[in-house]
Image: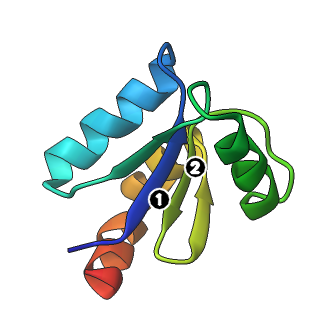
């Protein structure tokens, strides 16, 4: 199983796009909703180097970034390689 963590909020179109992409890839995502737990928001800020937008995605220990970063990895073929390495 791939260790994927996605920090998100309840109403976030980019979070939904990331969910859909991971679903198409057939991988599970541990989703942490920062609007439900303020402590998790602080953890996200620390892990992401201060980035405040959602989603913030981590594959293994690698900080991928947001949905645009994830989509760029997918277009380049690097996402599949990353998922294979951590799976």
Asked if residue 71 lies left or right of residue 63, the reply is: left
- Cβ–Cβ under 8 Å for marks 2 and 1: yes
Asked if residue 43 lies left or right of residue 6, the reply is: right
| Rendering coords of residue 18 (x, y %) | 39, 38
Q: Nearer the viewer, residue 70 or 6?
A: 6
| Rendering coords of residue 63 (x, y %) | 62, 65
Q: What residue appears at the point 60 percent right and 43 percent down from the top-left corner?
A: 66
Q: What residue appears at the point 71 percent right and 44 percent down from the top-left corner?
A: 39
Give the residue furthest to the right: 50
Q: Nearer the viewer, residue 22 or 30?
A: 30
Asked if residue 47 lies left or right of residue 54, the reply is: right
Q: Which residue is mark 2?
A: 69
| Rendering coords of residue 20 (x, y %) | 26, 34
Q: What residue appears at the point 61 percent right and 25 percent down from the top-left corner?
A: 35
As helix, strand or loop, the secondary structure at mark 2 comes to helix
Number of marks in the rendered image:
2
Q: Which residue is mark 1?
A: 73
Quadrant assignment for the N terminus? bottom left
Task: In the rendered view, tell whether residue 41 sits above or below residue 58.
Answer: above
Scheme of image coloration: rainbow
Residue neighbourhood size for the residue with mark 1, other residues' Cα within 10 Å, grouped as few (<14), some (14–19), many (≥20): some
Task: In the rendered view, tell whether residue 83 sits above or below residue 53.
Answer: below
């Amino acid at each position: 199983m791939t260790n994927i963590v996605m920090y998100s909020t309840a109403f976030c179109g980019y979070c939904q796009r990331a969910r859909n992409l991971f679903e198409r890839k057939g991988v599970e995502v541990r989703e942490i909703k920062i609007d439900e737990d303020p402590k998790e928001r602080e953890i996200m800020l620390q892990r992401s180097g201060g980035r405040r937008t959602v989603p913030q995605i981590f594959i293994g220990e690698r900080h991928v970034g947001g949905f645009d970063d994830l989509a760029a990895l997918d277009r380049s073929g690097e996402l599949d390689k990353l998922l294979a390495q951590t799976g």
